[in-house]
Structures are given as C-alpha cells and as structure tokens.
Image (cartoon, helix red, strand yellow):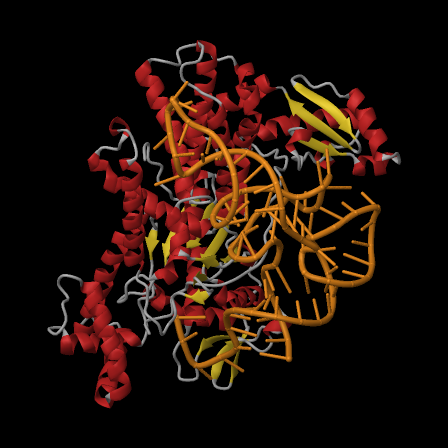
Amino acid sequence: MVGGSRAAGQARRARSRLPTPSRSPYALRSPMRLFADQIARALAQASGLAESELKIELPRDPAHGDLAFPCFLVAKALRKPPPAVAAELAGKLAIEGIEVKALGPYLNFRIDRGVLARAVLAEIQAQGAQYGSAAIGAGKTVVIDFSSPNIAKPMHVGHIRSTILGATLRRLFAFLGYRVVGINHIGDWGAQFGGLVVAIRRWKNEVDLERDPVQGLLELYQRSKKASEEDPQFESEARAAYQELESGKDGEVRALWRWVTEVSLRGFDKTYARLGIEHDLVRGESFYEPFLEPTIRRAEQAGVTEVSQGALVVALGGIDKSLAETPCLLRQSNGTTLYATRDLAGLFHRWDEFHFERCLYVVGGEQKLHFRQLKAVLKRMQLDWEPRVEHIDFGLLLGPGRVKLASRKGEVLVLDDLIDEVVEEAARILGEKQAAMEPAERLPEARLAEVAEAVGIGALCFNDQKRERIKDVLFDKAEILSFEGDTGPYLQYTHARFTRILAKAASAGEGGGTPDYALLAEAGPILLHFARFPDVVRSSAERCEPSELAQYLLGLCRELNNWYREHRVLGQDAALSASRLALVRASKTVLSNGLRLLGLRAPEQM
RNA sequence: GCGCCCGUAGCUCAGUCGGAUAGAGCGGCGGUUUCCUAAACCGCAGGCCGGCAGUUCGAAUCUGCCCGGGCGCACCA
C-alpha cells in the first residue's frame, strides 16, 4: 500500500486548568481573570498570605456565587477551623462591586450584575472578532504536522480526524499570537511508487486519467499491487523504476511521479477548500530524502547507534525500560531507511529551521510507540528540546457497532463522498425547515446550497471535536444528521437566531436608547460564560484539546437559548431594548469567534 | 506475555492543577408556539462514578492491585 496513513488511535489524559494568575507582559485579557485577580489581591491583604497562593475557583453550583475561595489551606496555615476563617475574612473584605459571603468553609463572591455586564460587554465590543485572542505566543513558533494523506489515493475517512483537529489547533495557536507552521507531511515516497509508475506506463490508456485522475490512479495502483504479486516480470520492472526514482535521475520515472504528486495534491486541495483547511507548508516524505544520510551520521556521531541483527538501531532501554524490546530502527539490514529515519530527519530539519516552542504531531494513537521511540532517541542524543516534541494522539473513527470504518480490507470510504452525503442530507433538512417558514422569512433560493454546505460540514466537523480527542469517535450518520442536541447545527442555529434579532432591530430602527446594564441582571450566567471565553481558548490550545472549546460553546448556547425563550429584545422600552441588544451583539461575537476557531461557518440565517 | 490507553444514567459523553447536593445530549414519559426561526425551551424518570484497598480534613478526580474493553509490540508506514 502507498504508505500507511498517519491517521487513527488513542492516548493520555490531559486536564483543564483554572485561569492561573499571569504577570507576564503578554497577559491574557480575560474579564474573569480581572475579577479573580481583584479578589486575590484583597484576600492577600486581609489574610497576609501571598497572592499567588490564593486559588480562586468557579463554584460548582452557580447559586453559591460567581467565584469562590475555599479556606481550607489558609485555615491550616492559621491553625483555625475553616468556617471561622471564612467568616473572619468575609468581615474584613471590602471590594467595590463584589459582594462577599461566607458559607461554611467557603467564601463566595458575587459580582454586581451591572458592573459585570458593563465590564464584559465593553471588552467584547472593543475586541470584536479578536475577543479571546492574546499575544501570549508572540515571538514563539508552533509547528503542527497534520492531515498527511498519501498520494495516488483519495483522502478517506481515516484522514478526517487529524485534518480537523490539526486545523483547529493551527487556528487556536495563531489566535494566541504564535507563529504557526502547519505542515502537510504527505506520503509521497516508497517502493510502491515503482509499481505505480510501471502501471501508468503499461495501462494508462485503459483508465480515465483525464476526467477523474485520482480515481484513475487508484485503479492503476490497485492493479499494480496485484501484478506485483502475480507477475515477476512486473515486479522486477517496478523495482527498477523505484531504484531510478531513488537515484534522483530526472527521467521518465521522476516525471511520472511528479505528475502523480501534482494531480493528487490538486485533489486534496479541493477537499481542503471545502473544509476550510489550510497548511503553511506541504512537505512530503520525499522532501526529507536528502537529509536521511546526514541524519544517520548525526546519530552515529552522537554515539547512540549500534548494529543489531544486521540493522542500524538506537537502543532505548536505558531511557525507558518499556522500550528495551523495541529499539528505534534507522536502517534495515538491506540498507534502506525507515519511517522513523524520515521522521527523525524531519524533526532535525524542523528544529534547525524554526526553533519551535512546540512541535505537534497530530497522528492517531496507534502510532504512540513510534513517537515514544523518536522522543527517546532525542533524549539519548541529549537534545534539550526533546520535551517540545509532542504526539497529539486521538481515538479511532468508528462506525455504528464500534466497527473500524477505514479498514484496510473493506471498502474505503472516500472523504469527498462522505462530505457529499452529509451536505445532501443537510440540504434536505434545510428544505423542510424552510418550507415550514413564512415565505418572507425564508432564505433566498441562491443561498440554500451555500448554507447546506456550511451546516453539513459543520455537523461533520463538530462531531469530531466535541469529545476529548483521545476518545474514539462514533460516526453514526443518523445521529449527526439529526441536528438535534449537541451538534454543530445547534450552535449555528443559535447564532442565526441571535443574528436575526440584530437584523430586525436595524430594519426597525430599534436599539438607539442608552443601555442600562443593571437591567441585564437575569443574564448573569451568560455574562459569566462570556467572561470565561479567553481562558477557554487558551486552555484548549495549551492542552491541544478542541473539545474544551466545543463543550464551552454547547454550554453557552444552552444558556442563550434559555434566555432567548424568556426575554424579548425588540419592542421593549428604549433602555431595555438597547441593553438586551448589547447582549445579543456580544453573543453573536463570542459564538462566531468560537465557531470560526473550530472551523465551522456561522451562517447569518438558516 | 509485555507496554500504553479507556471504563461516569439504557446509549453517546461533560465533570475546572482533589473541594460544597455528580451534570448534559439522545432515547422514554409529560408540557411550551396570538411572541425576535420549535434545528428551540421546560419538567419527570434514570447513577454503588468498573471493583477493592490506600493517601487526604475532603477522592469520579491522586496511588496500588484486580476485572472488562481497545491499541501497540525492530528490518511496514
């Protein structure tokens, strides 16, 4: 087969963190952090403890307050019972706009709703599409290896997770001010290309390489695989072709290989465009060919290599006992290099070129061992940047009944076909909903297809990101396409409804009054949600966990839809309408920023 | 056999460097539309957080062992 895709897998547990106090000049602009810092400062004064030791939390039950401080640790330091400490501190604290109450061993804080609304809404309005962004990554580079399909074959469902997760990480880090280098490490090298070249040579007139070159190449590829097994003549010709390719000779073989690469990349680009995905560099395995020998020499000079059973290996048992049985192979006994050699060469090259803060490999968990080996080799070579290299692993994509979808034997589910199927169903549902609406409220005919595309792809992408990435993804078509519950379309729908209010307010000339933020008292949960957004964005990026952002948006939409049901925006008195419109405007901003980061489009109407 | 990962409601999953009464979606049952999009909202039912020990003032969360499932285990990628 043409390389194994890097897709699929499993992993390690990462945890989200509370907003941590940050004193860096690039501190995140988070309204929540502002309030928490204010409280921590006052607490430090009242208790005599260092501000950095005082952990402000979000209460489990929002009825208790907006922020909380458990007094257990302070109590221990003061050798007094926690509830007594809480009561004592409550009496000492006086923070403007924040009410303090002791409840058992806890101090609960409630931010005045008017103060909260003014602070949060002003910040969102000021930042707009940048709300949630930061400069914490300024001057730092993050390299992200993702998607990485194999040429001469269409992208299939096995590539979807790496593609979607990687693209989101790329957007998240860019939003936080990092320089991001998204690399598509395509599988464009290997002995199998010898066979493909021979197949093209022999049978190019028997398949349609004009209209759908990718499909034609797939047929030729499959035929070459069969011929290699059955026809010794074909096999030796294929070997010769691969030798020529490896030799670097710029002849017929290389020209054909180049053509295959170009055709394949054009096919990938169409799919990427539909999904809104971009890479910064396309560097296939072939790119690293010239660096393989230098890489091996580098390892040899570091003194970490040895010959075992005729192969050149790096023994890793001294680094990690569980790797004692599986050294890293750099050269087979027949002299050829391996996957690990290429990735090691890539790693050196990337470090030399970018001096990255982090180098992320968005690759399925089934390749965990491979990346552990690579990191262990770096450790043996005593390269201090080894911790910056991370395998961002993820679970398998499974069909109903937990059967592996992209199996090597069964029918390969082509990604474009899957997208078509989902978009088609989205169009059908959209049509139904539209038919049930007042004619004046319906979408213009011309926009239907566009919105169906956004909604269908949104459903697909969101399903891949709503769970922790280490968990397997269950791809149940019916569930994803029902668009009810925890889905991308649910988020998009919420955004569309709120957007619609703004449009109607504009056309009715409403919203000109002066907002009175105290009138937004009932929107406390929403405002608190808004205030957390920058922290969630940062945490999602740091943990490489898009699901944190996805879950946040689901929670926010639940709050918003609830509020929408209870509170009318239009047709109220001027101050009330203006206040609620400010909230609606902020909702649209936060939702569309969040959706954009997850790679979902946010239609204005649906 | 060894290594790593997962195990929370019937199903799919959240659960904040350990903290106050464990939450949501789907499915089930019952409600909500003279009102800015009902792709929405509300209520009810449903849990020994796989099991047993341990650490701690406090454990779904940390540690150990066990059970169940998955992935991987040098000359493939």
Q: Quadrant of residue A146?
A: bottom left
Q: Quadrant of residue A125?
A: top left
* Residue A457 position within the rendered picture, expressed as x and y whole percent measured from the top left: 34, 47
Q: Is residue A425 visible?
A: yes
* Residue A289 position within the rendered picture, expressed as x and y whole percent measured from the top left: 34, 68
Q: Residue at x 57, y 17 (%)?
A: A114
Q: Nearer the viewer, residue A373 or A120?
A: A120
Q: How many marks?
A: 0
Q: Residue furthest left?
A: A205
- Please identify the quadrant where the C terminus of chain A is shown: top left
Position of A167 relative to A93 (above/below) = below
Q: Residue furthest bottom?
A: A232
Q: Residue at x 34, y 48 (%)?
A: A277
* Residue A131 position within the rendered picture, expressed as x and y whole percent measured from the top left: 46, 30
Q: Is A87 left or right of A181, judged from the image as shown?
A: right
Position of A73 relative to A335 (above/below) = above
Position of A300 relative to B52 (above/below) = below
* Residue A10 position within the rendered picture, expressed as x and y whole percent measured from the top left: 52, 62
Q: Residue at x 48, y 22 (%)?
A: A567
Q: Is A348 left or right of A15, judged from the image as shown?
A: left
